[in-house]
Amino acid sequence: MNTQALSDFYRGYIDCLNRQDWNALGQFVAEDVQYNGQRVGLSGYRDMLVGDFRAIPDLRFVIDRLVAEPPQVAARLCFDCTPVGELFGLPVNGKRVRFAENVFYEVQQGRIRDVWSVIDKAAIEAQLA
């Protein structure tokens, strides 16, 4: 994939997440995907995302920054949402919060194979103080 194709692929992946089209997730994510160094597989990755949407009914992935340099993608995703209970171990309980995720991906054979994610938990903590 060239840079433009990789960028388009990633935007398609984010659209898939926002539509919660779990049947299409395998078009973007490899069967043996790893998340932060642990093999979770496609089904584990899907389960994680389904759980995220259950905990955050108004969850929407918004791309703030995107750099595609094949085979890697780097993105800053922004969230403005209202989790129903705890979020990352914090008692949000229905309060609207804004935070970002910095995430890196490696795409192999047309699918996301590795995901490295860092969420700005401190931003959430500051809003709960």
Image (spheres, helix red, strand yellow):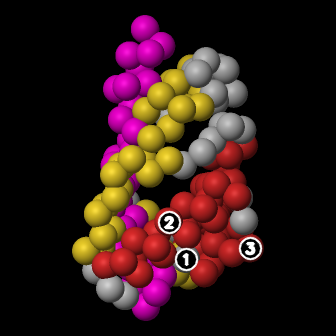
Residue at image location 50% in from the left, 38% down from the top: 79
Q: Residue 93, can we see it? A: yes
Above or below, comparing residue 51 to residue 89 in the picture: below
Q: Amino acid at mark 1?
A: Phe
Given the current orientation, which residue lies at the most extreme front position? 4
Closer to us: 110 or 121: 110
Q: Amino acid at mark 3?
A: Asn
Asked if the residue at tag 2 contacts the one at tag 3, i.e. Cβ–Cβ closer than 8 Å, the answer is: no
| Image mark for residue 11 | 2
Residue 25 in the image, given as x and y percentages of width and height: 63, 72
Q: Quadrant of the N terminus?
A: bottom left
Residue 45 in the image, given as x and y percentages of width and height: 57, 64
Measure the C-alpha gap from mark 3 to mark 1: 11 Å
Task: Say left or right for 104 vs 52.
Answer: left
Given the current orientation, which residue lies at the most extreme top position? 129
For disc 3, the neighbor class at 10 Å (few under 14, some 14 to 19, many from 20) is few
Q: Is residue 117 magenta?
A: yes
Q: Residue 85, can we see it? A: no
Asked if the residue at tag 1 contacts the one at tag 3, i.e. Cβ–Cβ closer than 8 Å, the answer is: no
Q: In the rendered structure, which segment of residues is drawn in magenta? A: 100-129
The mark that comes first in sequence, 2 or 1, is 2
